[in-house]
């Protein structure tokens, strides 16, 4: 039986049956961000060769050019369309790739997924005897011959045949009698239920419509007939039984065996459904745990590193857009299958818990986590640094050519402390100087002299003029010397007087 499950898994024809007939672009949109269905025409245009920006403008949806996940969808589409399976798995994760896309047997990229399917294939086979016994007790009871061969279904007049106790006679309304084989639940369970584990897990994650049809009771029918369609669990077994009975087309349309199986399906289908719920949760446990770990690391560590490295560079809006896009690729996309599974929890009636969280709550945790939780935390840390730098400058710090600040160490200001807070993690971004006061006026530092290192900081000694000692006031300058005239004084002439 293990070989049968592995062989079925290897083909992946059942694994991705919803995807096989669906548009690859639609699948990529559902895996990455279902809300982008509105952008499908833009993406079809971009696939044709134009840029996303050109197509978005042509469609009158220019805002979609800034939606980072449009490009993610196009990348996933391209990988799937070109059968580049390893790149597709690297892009969306092994679980999403192997449950949503039609990956052929030639490329063994789904081993991680396969191991869970094989494991649950073995579990479901081991449990089949107990399931058969429960179903048999609830519906009709056992024939006590050591095998799980049950009497006919409720509602039929079907006493055991005298010739063969494993058969019974069904009398139809028109009086025609049929000698039919009784249902062997062991065989039905192992042949028609256990072999559809991988299909059930895939449908539970990505195709709730198919999953509900698989577990429906009475089983789903082909249009205007009583014939079980291929979605109904047990349908292939019923077809095989009818073939062994030699039923013609008219007899098959009456759905004799199909109607006889309905009461058993009402008991068996819920048990299979619950096993699929458990198998799917275990399959998704790895990407769910990875999301919790990754989101925690991004919140506690990445915000700190990015805020340290990029808070003071220009165009912060671009930084934010790049960070959200990178966060989506690293945190949200690997858990895309978990989000899809969660979004269908209510519709499928799945109350399974994963990592202690109910199935229905996971979609709210994963989708848009980067823009809803991570980005505000990053902005908060960056804003704290921006505000600290503003306080440092207001407290007297001066900008340095290298981008750091030179801050005073006196005057009752915490400017240097605010600078260290703003530039936390960057050695040497904050330097300090001790202002010197002369003539009642603080002398600001001139060109920086070689720094003097002290523990924990660098002190820059200013080159201002030395202030005079306060004990010796400056001497009064003497008055300037008198300036003598440069003209000569007049000397009176002396003449002799004439005598008499």
Image: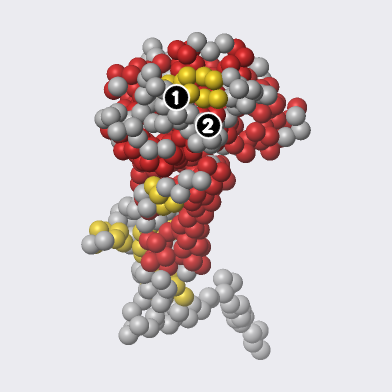
Q: Is residue 468 above or below residue 158?
A: below
Q: Is residue 262 above or below residue 225?
A: below
Direction left: furthest residue: 455
Q: How many other residues sit within 10 Å of disc 2, few (<14), some (14-19) or many (≥20)?
A: some
Visual colour scheme: secondary structure
**Residue at 59% in and 24% down:** 172
Image mark count: 2
Q: Is residue 326 left or right of residue 470?
A: right
Q: How many other residues sit within 10 Å of disc 1, few (<14), some (14-19) or many (≥20)?
A: many
Q: Mark 2 = which residue?
A: 156
Q: Is residue 94 above or below residue 241?
A: below
**Residue at 47% in and 61% down:** 384
Task: Tell me where residue 280 appears, x and y as whole percent.
Answer: 40, 37
**Of the numbered discs in the image, which one, if any, rests on residue 44?**
none
User: Which of the pair 363/198 is nearer the observer?
Assistant: 198
Can residue 97 be spotted in the picture?
no
Task: Tell me where residue 402 appears, x and y as whole percent.
Answer: 43, 48
Q: Quadrant of residue 268?
A: top left
Q: Provide the secondary structure element on which disc 1 rests.
A: strand
**Residue at 46% in and 20% down:** 180
Direction front: furthest residue: 162
User: Which of the pair 41/230 is nearer the observer?
Assistant: 230
Quadrant of the snapshot with the N terminus: top left
Q: Are marks 2 and 1 in contact (CB under 8 Å)?
A: yes
Earlier along the polypeptide chain: callout 2 or callout 1? 2
Task: Tell me where residue 428 appears, x and y as whole percent.
Answer: 33, 53
**Residue at 56% in and 43% down:** 347
Q: Provide the secondary structure element on which disc 2 rests.
A: loop
**Of the numbered discs in the image, which one, if any, rests on residue 168?**
1
Quadrant of the snapshot with the C terminus: bottom right
Q: Quadrant of residue 188?
A: top left
């Amino acid at each position: 039986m293990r070989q049968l499950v592995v062989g079925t898994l290897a083909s992946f024809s059942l694994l991705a049956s919803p995807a096989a007939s669906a548009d690859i672009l639609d699948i990529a949109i559902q895996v990455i961000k279902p809300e982008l269905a509105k952008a499908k025409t833009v993406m079809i245009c971009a696939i044709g060769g134009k840029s996303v920006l050109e197509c978005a403008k042509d469609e009158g949806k220019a805002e979609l050019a800034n939606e980072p996940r449009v490009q993610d969808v196009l990348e996933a589409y391209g990988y799937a369309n070109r059968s580049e399976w390893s790149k597709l798995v690297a892009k969306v994760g092994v679980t999403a790739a192997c449950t949503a896309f039609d990956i052929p047997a030639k490329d063994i990229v789904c081993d991680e997924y396969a191991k869970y399917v094989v494991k649950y294939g073995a579990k479901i086979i081991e449990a089949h005897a107990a399931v058969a016994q429960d179903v048999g007790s609830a519906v009709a009871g056992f024939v006590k011959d050591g095998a799980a061969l049950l009497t006919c279904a409720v509602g039929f007049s079907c006493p055991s045949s005298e010739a063969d106790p494993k058969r019974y006679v069904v009398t139809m309304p028109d009086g025609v009698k049929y000698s039919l084989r009784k249902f062997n639940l062991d065989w039905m369970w192992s042949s028609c239920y256990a072999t559809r584990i991988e299909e059930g897990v895939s449908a539970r994650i990505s195709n709730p419509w198919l999953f509900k049809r698989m577990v429906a009771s009475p089983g789903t029918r082909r249009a205007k007939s009583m014939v079980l369609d291929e979605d109904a669990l047990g349908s292939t077994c019923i077809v095989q039984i009818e073939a062994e009975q030699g039923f013609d087309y008219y007899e098959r349309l009456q759905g004799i065996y199909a109607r006889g199986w309905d009461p058993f399906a009402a008991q068996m289908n819920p048990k299979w459904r619950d096993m699929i719920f458990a198998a799917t949760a275990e399959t998704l446990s790895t990407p769910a745990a990875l999301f919790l770990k990754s989101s925690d690391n991004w919140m506690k560590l990445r915000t700190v590193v990015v805020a340290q490295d990029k808070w003071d560079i220009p165009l912060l809006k671009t930084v934010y857009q790049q960070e959200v896009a990178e966060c989506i690729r690293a945190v949200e996309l690997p858990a895309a299958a978990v989000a899809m599974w969660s979004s269908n929890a209510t519709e499928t009636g799945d109350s399974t818990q994963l990592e202690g969280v109910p199935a229905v709550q996971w979609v709210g945790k994963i989708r848009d986590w980067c823009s809803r939780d991570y980005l505000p935390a990053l902005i908060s840390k960056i804003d704290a640094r921006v505000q600290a730098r503003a306080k440092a400058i207001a407290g007297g710090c001066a900008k340095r050519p290298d981008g750091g600040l030179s801050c005073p160490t006196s005057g009752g200001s915490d400017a240097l402390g605010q600078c260290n807070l703003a530039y936390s993690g960057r050695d040497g971004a904050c330097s300090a100087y001790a202002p010197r006061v002369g003539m009642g006026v603080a002398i600001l530092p001139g060109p920086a002299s070689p720094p003097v290192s002290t523990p924990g900081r660098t002190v820059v000694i200013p080159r201002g003029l030395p202030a005079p000692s306060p004990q010796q006031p400056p001497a009064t300058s003497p008055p300037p010397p008198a300036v003598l005239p440069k003209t000569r004084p007049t000397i009176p002439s002396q003449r002799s007087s004439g005598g008499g």
